[in-house]
Image (cartoon, coloured by chain):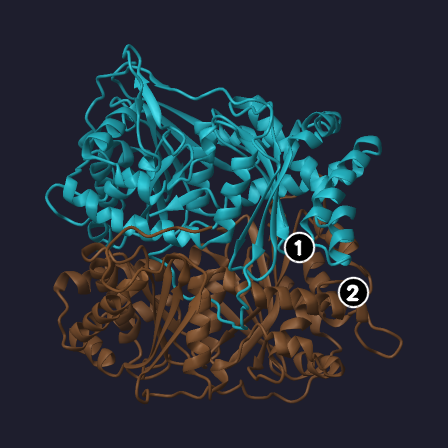
């Protein structure tokens, strides 16, 4: 699927992926901000406040009713990090215009684009030019609920804690969801300042995947931003890359859970955009990216230590994680097996079969991207953030020449940084004891 | 049942889609839905889930009772093969991605591919028709599934769901955890697995659905090569105890390591109707009714949200199995009792002052759009098609059934469905453990693919 990229004005880009494959249109507006602990909570909160209402639809009830009229269009807020960037904004999913009810001439795309523009640029403000206090307060409390709820998913929580500890001295260690402390002492006065930075200065990436005509869509998107003040182009926030870990660190915390959750954090030494980067996704696939990977085949299938064990990470920052849910007493066994499998790749111990599987499974994932609008957005946006614009097809072609030696070479650059274990206290058995565990409520 | 292949085509003008239904000579029904997309997706499913734990074949005297969690265990063990080859690897090497899941009334094996479709289909039909169970490979799986059970034990969404089902149902097997327990799976033997397999994995109890850029002839040719004709067509008889209208309980409160108190309110459907057009009509009417009562544009949601009694984690939906149905409302709240009280009061008020016809029309249109948008991915289409099939509904007729839903019928359901003596609530309160702050969206979870909805479990 070809992506057309159009610069609309200073730092505002429109990315158009034309396709008639879907019965849905997907439109998103993304603001790229520097990740910083002084502003993370404020930025995280902004889309939530804006989603509460705008001038024409001043509360959730009227706004949501409008969305229902627009054939159940969904507008979701987003807030996540890539490298040391915080990305906030909105994504809209709508019915494709070809499927409206008979005799309905609504310009669905135009209506949704204009509503998104309203939400972003025409917020409800008080006479003093501030956001409504009740909206701020209620969304601040909801954000605190969301931060507290991170513990509900133990696996994800373990990755979060591992990152915080591993990158404590770096921007990447900043919680993109904000922290309870940040919301307790929220600098409400700075919200407008952050809002202005977001709308006037931050790089904006708009994505549309759907069947709407390019020039028509571009006109609607231009309208959304027309008359908005923009400062001169600024550069994307930079991500500091730590190529090599210092001495490995080990942390353990305990929580009332049945299962132990292990996260091992590594520095990859290779990031997207590096000359040798193309070997990295193949490495990850062999290591722990598929059910035919070394981690799955050994830690799960051979040793029966876990249900899940896989590798993932942030390719902009150069972080690699291995996650596994295990019994507490198997912690050392699992760590040792995971490191052994990594060592094998470093030594070039990969069978032809493994190389074949890695390539086949990775290329399948790349070819499948065009079947999913969010996949298309995520592929291109992830690359735009580091100034790359290659398509999945171009990437696959370039990967053809990569073999065992290149993969082993990127694996040798990987260094162990942090082992984090979230011990589950509800099933603690003494080390070495084999008896059945007691499950407690 | 005749051992010959019969084919028909169904079309939808509304969707501009069509699919072929093939009754294959082997006894298997095959559905091929052509779709010009990069991925082709295949789903091979059997009408067999965690609720089917007591069964016999027509003519047999005795019912066989098997340990809880066996359907899911069997699903895991199907990946094992006699020649020791690894099923996942067979798929992966040709660029296909395989998985499987078990729900309370279905087990299904799937793959998606962007090439080598016929080879992948061969592997799928081959491995699902070749069971290989030994004491040794069962023991290995007990460790893996033991950890899967541990993972779900720590998952509050999963826990609160089963806590609620144990309140709503006195005897229905929907109360049984799909994965079973560590104790129940420890009792599973190769004989149990073969017995379940030969009963439920007969081709006439299964269906194959393919969606993607493929031709029906290709699919039939692979089926001709791999599938053996079924000879035994005895009916499967599952034994289910009769479920009373009353509830097993109305409240359950447990504590867990969660950030904020979670609640799940359930409404027991005492006239569940799963099969055919009538069942689909009722589900669609209930869906529109729920949107009218609890939707994000409605008074209930917005009042509760603005008062800070619920947050955006609030969700609701109707679920049904072959034997039961219930409405579920879940969310976070510091005061779940107040949420339940307000929910009850709101419904009683709606009975006296029903939602307007214009609300109905608007939400019916939203449901219409959602129906159309569901035909957007090969896996989504195949999964919807199969679950509709197993409920005796043609997926293309769902659009017509939706169009026929009447405001008056929806209002009638309001008084019929919602009775306070059928309401129950399960609550999870936070442990004293204080959670600290954090972040991070998770990365690639390809080989985990844990089901996002409770009550369904993926390999």
Question: Badge 2: few (under 14), some or many (20 or more) residues near its Cα, within 10 Å?
Answer: many
Local secondary structure at mark 1: loop
Q: In this view of the protein, which residue sits in the foreground, A365 or B338?
A: B338
Residue A374 image position (x, y, % from top left):
50, 60
Local secondary structure at mark 2: loop
Residue B169 image position (x, y, % from top left):
53, 30
Q: Mark 2 — on which chain does it sit?
A: A
The image quarter containing residue B221 is top left
Which residue is drawn at the image coordinates 28% and 73% (left, top)?
Answer: A398
Pointer 1 residue: B333
Which residue is drawn at the image coordinates 37% and 66% (left, top)?
Answer: A392
Q: Which mark is residue A54?
A: 2
Residue that lies at the very extreme toward the left in this rendered image:
B83
Question: Is residue B162 visible in the rendered structure shown here?
Answer: yes
* Disc 2/disc 1 C-alpha distance (Å): 27 Å
Residue B151 image position (x, y, % from top left):
39, 54
- Give the colour in which the image draws chain B: cyan
Mark nearest the camera among 2 and 1 is 1
Question: Is residue A403 visible in the rendered structure shown here?
Answer: no
The image quarter containing residue A26 is bottom right
Residue B179 relative to residue A101: left or right: left
- Give the colour in which the image draws chain A: brown
């Amino acid at each position: 699927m070809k992506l057309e990229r159009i610069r609309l004005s200073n730092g505002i880009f429109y990315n158009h992926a034309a396709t008639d494959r879907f019965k849905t249109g997907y439109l998103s507006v993304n603001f790229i901000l520097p990740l910083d602990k002084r502003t993370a909570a404020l930025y995280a909160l902004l889309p939530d406040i804006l989603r509460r209402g705008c001038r024409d639809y001043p509360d959730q009830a009227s706004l949501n009713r409008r969305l229902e009229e627009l054939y159940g269009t969904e507008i979701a807020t987003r807030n996540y990090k890539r490298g040391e960037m915080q990305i906030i904004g909105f994504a809209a999913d709508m019915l494709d215009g070809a499927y409206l009810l008979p005799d309905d001439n609504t310009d669905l795309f135009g209506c949704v684009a204009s509503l998104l523009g309203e939400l972003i640029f025409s917020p409800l403000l008080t006479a003093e030019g501030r956001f409504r206090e009740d909206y701020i307060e209620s969304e601040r409390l909801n954000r605190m609920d969301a931060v507290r709820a991170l513990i509900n998913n133990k696996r994800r929580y373990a990755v979060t804690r591992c990152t915080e500890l591993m990158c404590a001295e770096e921007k990447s260690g900043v919680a993109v969801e904000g922290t309870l402390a940040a919301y307790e002492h929220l600098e409400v006065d700075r919200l407008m300042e952050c809002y202005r930075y977001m709308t006037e200065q931050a790089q904006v990436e708009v994505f549309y995947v759907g069947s709407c005509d390019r020039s028509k869509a571009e006109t609607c998107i231009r309208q959304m931003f027309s008359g908005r003040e923009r400062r001169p182009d600024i550069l994307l926030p930079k991500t500091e890359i730590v190529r090599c870990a210092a001495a490995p660190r080990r942390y353990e915390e305990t929580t009332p859970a049945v299962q132990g959750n292990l996260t091992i954090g590594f520095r990859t030494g290779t990031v997207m955009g590096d000359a040798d980067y193309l070997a990295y996704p193949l490495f990850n696939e062999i290591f722990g990216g598929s059910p035919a990977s070394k981690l799955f085949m050994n830690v799960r299938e051979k040793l029966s230590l876990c249900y899940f064990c896989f590798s993932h990470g942030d390719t902009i920052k150069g972080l690699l994680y291995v996650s596994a849910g295990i019994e507490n007493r198997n912690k050392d066994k699992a760590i040792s097996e995971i490191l052994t499998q990594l060592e094998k790749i470093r030594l070039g111990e990969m069978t032809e079969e493994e190389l074949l599987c890695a390539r086949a499974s990775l290329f399948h994932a790349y070819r499948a991207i065009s079947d999913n609008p969010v996949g298309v957005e995520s592929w291109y946006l992830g690359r735009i953030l580091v100034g790359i614009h290659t398509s999945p097809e171009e990437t696959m072609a370039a990967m053809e020449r990569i073999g065992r030696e290149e993969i082993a070479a990127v694996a040798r650059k990987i260094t162990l940084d942090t082992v984090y274990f979230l011990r589950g206290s509800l099933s603690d058995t003494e080390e070495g004891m084999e008896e059945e565990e007691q499950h407690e409520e | 049942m005749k051992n010959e292949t019969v084919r028909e085509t169904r079309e939808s003008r509304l969707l501009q889609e069509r699919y072929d239904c093939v009754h294959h000579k082997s006894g298997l029904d095959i559905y091929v839905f052509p779709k010009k997309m990069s991925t082709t997706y295949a789903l091979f499913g059997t009408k067999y889930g965690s609720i089917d734990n007591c069964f016999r074949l027509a003519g047999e005297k005795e019912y066989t009772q098997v340990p809880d969690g066996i359907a899911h265990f069997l699903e895991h063990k199907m990946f094992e093969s006699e020649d020791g080859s690894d099923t996942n690897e067979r798929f992966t090497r040709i660029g296909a991605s395989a998985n499987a899941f078990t729900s309370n009334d279905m087990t299904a094996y799937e793959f998606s591919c962007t090439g080598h479709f016929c080879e992948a289909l061969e592997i799928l039909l081959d491995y699902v028709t070749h069971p290989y169970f030994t004491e040794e490979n069962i023991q290995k799986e007990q460790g893996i599934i033991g950890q899967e059970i541990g993972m779900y034990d720590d998952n509050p969404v999963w826990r609160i769901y089963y806590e609620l089902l144990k309140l709503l149902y006195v005897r229905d097997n929907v109360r049984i955890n799909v994965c079973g327990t560590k104790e129940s799976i420890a009792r599973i033997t190769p004989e149990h697995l073969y017995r379940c397999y030969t009963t439920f994995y007969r081709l006439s109890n299964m269906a194959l659905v393919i969606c993607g850029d493929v031709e029906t002839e290709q699919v039939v040719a692979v089926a001709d090569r791999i599938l053996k004709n079924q000879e035994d067509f005895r009916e499967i008889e599952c034994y289910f105890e009769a479920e009373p209208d009353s509830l097993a309980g109305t409240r359950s409160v447990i504590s867990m390591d969660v950030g904020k108190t979670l609640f799940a309110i359930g409404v027991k459907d005492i006239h569940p109707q799963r099969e055919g057009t009538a069942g689909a009509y009722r589900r669609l009417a209930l869906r529109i009714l729920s949107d009218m009562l609890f939707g994000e544009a409605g008074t209930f949601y917005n009042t509760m949200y603005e008062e800070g009694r619920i947050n955006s984690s609030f969700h609701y939906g109707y679920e049904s199995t072959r034997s039961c149905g219930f409405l579920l409302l879940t969310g976070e709240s510091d005061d779940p009792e107040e949420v339940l009280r307000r929910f009850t009061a709101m419904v009683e008020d709606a009975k006296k002052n029903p939602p307007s016809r214009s609300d109905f029309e608007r939400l019916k249109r939203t449901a219409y759009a959602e129906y159309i948008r569901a035909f957007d991915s090969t896996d989504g289409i195949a999964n919807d098609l199969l679950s509709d099939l197993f409920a005796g509904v043609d997926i293309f007729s769902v659009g017509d059934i939706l169009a026929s839903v009447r405001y008056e019928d929806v209002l009638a359901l309001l008084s019929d469905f919602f009775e306070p003596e059928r309401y129950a609530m399960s609550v999870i309160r936070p442990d004293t453990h204080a959670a600290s702050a954090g972040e991070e969206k998770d990365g690639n979870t390809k080989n985990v693919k844990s089901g996002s909805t409770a009550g369904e479990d993926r390999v």
